[in-house]
Image (cartoon, rainbow, N blue to C red):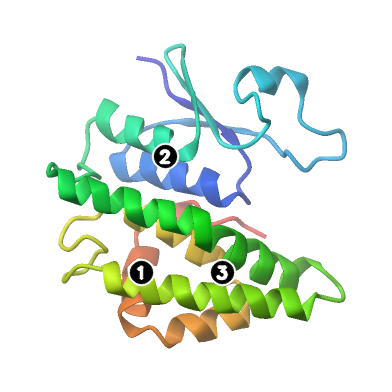
Amino acid sequence: MARPILYGADYSVYVRIARMTLEEKGVDYELVPLDIFAAEGVPAWYLEHHPFGRIPAFEHDGFRLFETGAITRYVDEAFDGPALQPADPRGRARIGQITGMLDAYGYRAMVWDVAVERLEKAPADEELIAGGLSQAETVLKVLTSLKAEGPWLLGNQLTLADLHAASIIGYFTKVAEGRDMLARFAEIRDWYARVTARQSFVRTEKVA
């Protein structure tokens, strides 16, 4: 069976989620670098893989996918390795709730409005950062309320929810405001320490 191919850039939160999933499953894959922010724009050939020109996209034995959630669920179900989704429908629904919440309310605020704004803009828009931090606080409060008892977000089983959250929070904590806010949420802070110690997180860390 051919190695799966993942198209994307190592700076991308969503490419990292897919890579962490492949790493947790022990899948040998090829990462094809693709910078959608390059000066020349998205290459025309890539639009056959992702018609909206976003990353990641995925291919396995001629089967193509885009959208991170679809990719990670496929990887979990198509390959051997530890299951990253619980068998029960409530557990799977909780994964969908957590990842959907992070996509809709966490990603923009934590990554773009706070981290990217602070790291890459000079001068930074302090009002935008303040708004992002307010939203991030709500996200972390909700994530705390949804976390089950145990080491991982759903309890004793590491799942796709952990990988999704780790990548987004990982970018948020690149800046002091993100680290300071995370420190106020003890349960999520301790969970984050556990998930960032995993080899899937370490091996997918972008080298500056």
The residue beneath circle 3 is 172
Q: Residue at x 45, y 41 (%)?
A: 18
Counting other residues with Cα less than 10 Å from the Cα at mark 1, is it few (<14), some (14-19), or many (20 or more)? Answer: some
Front-lying residue, 76 or 28: 76
In the image, residue 72 lies at what x, y percent? Answer: 38, 38
The residue beneath circle 1 is 143
| Viewer-nearest of discs 3 and 1 | 1
Q: Is residue 52 left or right of residue 185?
A: right
Dot 1: what SS?
helix
Where is residue 70, by image quadrant?
top left
Between the residue at mark 3 and the residue at mark 2, the CA separation in whole angstroms equals 20 Å
Q: Residue at x 28, y 26 (%)?
A: 78
Q: Is residue 70 left or right of residue 174?
A: left
Q: Residue at x 53, y 43 (%)?
A: 15
Q: Residue at x 34, y 64 (%)?
A: 195
Between the residue at mark 1 and the residue at mark 2, the CA separation in whole angstroms equals 18 Å
| Three-letter residue code for mark 3 | Phe
In the image, residue 160 lies at what x, y percent? Answer: 32, 49
Counting other residues with Cα less than 10 Å from the Cα at mark 3, is it few (<14), some (14-19), or many (20 or more)? Answer: many
Counting other residues with Cα less than 10 Å from the Cα at mark 2, is it few (<14), some (14-19), or many (20 or more)? Answer: some
Task: Name the mark on residue 187.
Answer: none
Q: Quadrant of the N terminus?
A: top left
Front-lying residue, 175 or 54: 54
Earlier along the polypeptide chain: callout 1 or callout 2?
2
The image shows residue 122, relative to residue 30, as above or below, that is: below
The image shows residue 2, relative to residue 130, as above or below, that is: above
The residue beneath circle 2 is 69
